[in-house]
Image: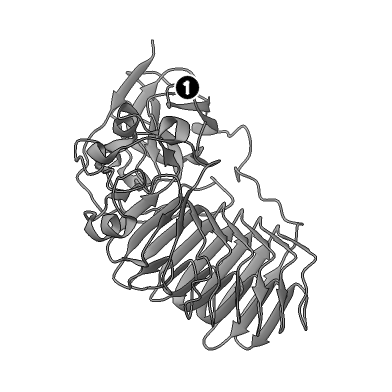
């Protein structure tokens, strides 16, 4: 018999960072818990309201939905924690959703679909531009949790001083994640044609599955990031093409390191250029002790006055460029294990938008009552994924695949689903499972 029990204690709003051992090549960053059904449709195209107004009025921790097609951001300032999620459209690409634009009863993805909207990401992004001279989006230093996903940013020659697409400062251990964001055709007078960020006070920035194409600035044609105070930056699964530093260093990326860590992995740099050092990447040691590692990344056709691919200046920065020679295993232990274990092996979305989770158990069979498994998102600390923890989790005793979660259950900041071995009393055995990246779309 297949048994599944959903645990629903949502008591904790903010959870500690946790990693299940032996899971993935990259440590999983955990964000604050934002309840999936708190997603509110508050702005977009087709008469659904101006994006600037939506961002200014959205409640703390809620989600702004910029609809397809392109909209003017009016230089919106993000001054509170939120999610900005593009990729939603009206069936057929036309229609009037004004009557639904600020309807608080439309909550979560299921509510949007019921109202007639379709989610077409990652193939389709919602696009923002700006008609003034400001960045398309600016991030205030009081923001501590922000996710932007499935967006295209093109500043149409607005030419602000820094950060044509996104500009801002991260402070106070802030977490910002940019997923499937295309920065294209954006420029800045000084630094960061597509993106300019100062990452301070132990903050953490992740840029993943994103593209930087045809952006330019005096320096840092695609990106300029200044890293301080043991902050961390991760750039992965992203591409940089035809970005230009027109009067300085770093055609694609300029890093100014004041103490912290940058990891660039599984990314490509093609036909970027600079008039100074680093046609693709320039790393400047400004103060403190820092580390920059470039792994599994490719460079082709980049050009600089010095150092076509990676340039370095200043002191205090340890740079490792491991090229394409490193391939990290997803499970760092003997297979099959000798003790009780559970492993997610694949996750897909079916036609009902349910996550189909394929998994295996080792040295036991998952049944209830009895020893079983707990599934949970990586917004839950593993220590909280079973009794007496606050969860939430789903207890499951049955065969693969598991389909107890759909995409309306996913918290906005979740990136992976996880599994642990659970005892009959619903306590969990730590370090007995793994996490698997969630698919973006069917």
In this view, 439 is above or below 211: above
The single residue placed furthest to the right in the displayed view is 301
Percent position of residue 123, x then y: 56, 41
Q: How many marks?
A: 1
Percent position of residue 190, x then y: 54, 83
Residue in the image at 21% along x and 38% along y: 9
Q: Looking at this view, is 37 or 110 the one in front?
A: 110
Say if residue 339 shows up in the picture: no
The quarter of the picture where the N terminus appears is: top left
Residue assigned mark 1: 351
In this view, 435 is above or below 357: below
Task: Classify residue 163 as left or right of residue 412.
Answer: right
Q: Looking at this view, is 366 or 130 the one in front?
A: 130
Task: Classify residue 394 as left or right of residue 105.
Answer: right
**For residue 396, what is the image quadrant?**
top left
Say if residue 177 shows up in the picture: yes
Percent position of residue 17, x then y: 38, 56
Q: Looking at this view, is 105 or 291 the one in front?
A: 105
In this view, 196 is above or below 20: below
| Dot 1 alpha-carbon crowd within 10 angstroms: few under 14, some 14 to 19, many 20 or more | few
Percent position of residue 230, x then y: 46, 75
Q: How are the residues colored? A: one colour
Residue in the image at 50% along x and 35% along y: 441
User: SS for tag 1?
Assistant: loop
């Amino acid at each position: 018999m297949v048994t599944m029990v959903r645990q629903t204690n949502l008591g904790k709003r903010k959870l500690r960072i946790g990693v299940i051992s032996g899971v993935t090549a990259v440590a999983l960053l955990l964000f604050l818990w934002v309840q999936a059904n708190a997603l509110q449709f508050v702005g977009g195209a087709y008469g659904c309201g101006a994006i600037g107004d939506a961002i200014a009025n959205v409640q703390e921790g809620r989600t702004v939905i910029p609809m397809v097609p392109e909209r003017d951001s009016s230089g919106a300032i993000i001054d509170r924690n939120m999610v900005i999620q593009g990729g939603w459209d009206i069936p057929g690409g036309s229609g009037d959703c004004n009557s639904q634009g600020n309807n608080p009863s439309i909550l979560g993805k299921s509510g949007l679909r019921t109202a007639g909207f379709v989610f077409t990401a990652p193939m389709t992004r919602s696009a923002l531009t700006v008609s003034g001279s400001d960045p398309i989006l600016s991030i205030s230093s009081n923001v501590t949790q922000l996710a932007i996903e499935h967006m295209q940013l093109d500043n149409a020659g607005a030419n602000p001083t820094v950060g044509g697409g996104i500009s801002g400062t991260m402070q106070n251990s802030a977490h910002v994640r940019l997923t499937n964001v295309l920065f294209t055709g954006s420029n800045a007078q000084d630094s960061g044609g597509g993106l300019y960020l100062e990452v301070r006070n132990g903050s953490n920035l992740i840029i993943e599955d994103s593209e930087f194409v045809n952006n330019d600035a005096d320096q840092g044609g695609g990106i300029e990031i200044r890293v301080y105070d043991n902050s961390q930056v991760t750039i992965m699964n992203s591409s940089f093409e035809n970005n230009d530093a027109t009067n300085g260093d770093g055609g694609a990326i300029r890093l100014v390191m004041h103490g912290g860590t940058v990891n660039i992995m599984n990314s490509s740099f093609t036909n970027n250029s600079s008039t100074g050092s680093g046609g693709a990447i320039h790393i400047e040691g400004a103060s403190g002790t820092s580390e920059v590692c470039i792994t599994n990344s490719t460079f082709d056709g980049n050009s600089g006055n010095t150092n076509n691919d990676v340039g370095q200046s200043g002191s205090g920065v340890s740079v490792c460029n491991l090229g394409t020679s490193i391939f990290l295993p997803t499970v760092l232990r003997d297979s099959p294990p000798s003790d009780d274990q559970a492993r997610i092996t694949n996750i897909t979305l079916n036609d009902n938008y349910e996550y189909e989770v394929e998994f295996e158990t080792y040295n036991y069979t998952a049944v209830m009552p009895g020893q079983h498994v707990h599934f949970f998102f990586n917004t839950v600390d593993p220590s909280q994924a079973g009794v007496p923890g606050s969860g939430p989790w789903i207890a499951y005793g049955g065969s693969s695949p598991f389909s107890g979660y759909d995409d309306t259950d996913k918290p906005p900041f979740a990136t992976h689903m996880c599994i642990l071995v659970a005892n009959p009393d619903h306590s969990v055995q730590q370090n007995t499972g793994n996490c698997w990246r969630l698919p973006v779309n069917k």
